[in-house]
């Protein structure tokens, strides 16, 4: 069975990371692309697992050598998807997930064929704002900027193949697993 790579997109704070972590826990055969970023690691983040944390010159080098499938500047930092690893995993028939923001998603939807997209939406604007504030890891100026960006990002849902409203992690994860085409056993589906 071959899988169509799936881009998971949605505003910052909507819970993409949490839902995807649940999907990986349920389905270890899913492969999540590890992005390169110039931002500093947050407490607990591990280089090579959560991101490849690289310097600005290293990131520029990746772009110059065509090492990125897509990249974008987001909140002052650059983020990109290493190309080779994604191509390899797709060729191996793995179920590939990319967790990226909207500018990058646009590029991937143009460059990778076939590809599918899932938009993870908040139940409401108030809920998203609460989540962005609740994370407590960023200063107010960063959160304000993220809210502005989030409003723009929400408009991207109309360009996606499927929308999952993230009311509850377990059901969103189950919906994503079904969309990827893996299905669930009855043990996992509660
Ligand atoms: P954070 O700094 O909170 O980890 O990520 C900020 C945003 O960058 C999130 O919306 C996340 O999905 C996105 N992001 C993570 N990796 C990539 C990537 O490789 N490319 C793009 N375009 N966005 C990414």
Image (tube, rainbow, N blue to C red):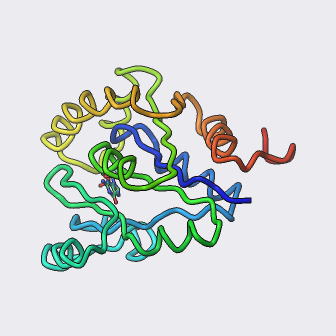
Q: Is residue 160 left or right of residue 29?
A: left
Q: Would you identify the image quadrant in which residue 9 lies?
A: top left
Residue 73 in the image: state x and y as whole percent: 18, 54
- Towards the viewer: 68 or 126: 68
Q: Quadrant of the N terminus?
A: bottom right
Q: Is residue 78 left or right of residue 53?
A: left
- Residue at 41% x, 20% y is 124
Give the quarter the ligand 1 occupies: bottom left
Residue 3 in the image: state x and y as whole percent: 64, 56
- Towards the viewer: 20 or 179: 179
Residue 100 in the image: state x and y as whole percent: 37, 51
Q: Is residue 16 left or right of residue 89?
A: left
- Residue at 66% x, 46% y is 177
Q: Is residue 2 left or right of residue 55?
A: right
Q: Would you identify the image quadrant in which residue 58 lies?
A: bottom left
- Residue at 27% x, 66% y is 37
Name above or below for residue 124 compared with residue 68.
Answer: above
Name above or below for residue 126 compared with residue 27.
Answer: above
Residue 50 in the image: state x and y as whole percent: 42, 66
- Residue at 40% x, 29% y is 157
- Towards the viewer: 169 or 175: 175
Q: Quadrant of the C terminus?
A: top right
Q: Give the tally of numbered discs.
A: 0
Name above or below for residue 188 compared with residue 40.
Answer: above
């Amino acid at each position: 069975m071959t899988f169509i790579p799936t881009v998971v997109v949605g505003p910052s704070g909507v819970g993409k990371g949490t839902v995807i972590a649940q999907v990986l826990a349920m389905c270890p055969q899913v492969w999540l692309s590890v992005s390169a970023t110039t931002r500093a690691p947050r407490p607990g983040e591990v280089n090579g697992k959560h991101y490849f944390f690289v310097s600005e010159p290293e990131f520029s080098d990746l772009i110059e050598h065509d090492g990125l499938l897509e990249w974008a500047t987001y909140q002052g930092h650059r983020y990109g998807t290493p190309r080779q690893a994604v191509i390899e995993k797709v060729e191996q028939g793995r179920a590939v997930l990319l967790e990226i923001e909207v500018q990058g998603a646009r590029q991937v939807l143009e460059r990778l064929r076939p590809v599918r997209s899932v938009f993870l939406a908040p139940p409401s604007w108030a809920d998203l704002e609460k989540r962005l504030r609740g994370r407590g890891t960023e200063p107010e100026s960063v959160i304000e900027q993220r809210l502005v960006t989030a409003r723009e990002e929400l408009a991207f849902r109309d360009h996606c193949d499927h929308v999952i409203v993230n009311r509850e992690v377990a059901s969103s994860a189950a919906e994503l697993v079904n969309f990827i085409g893996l299905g669930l056993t009855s043990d996992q589906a509660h």
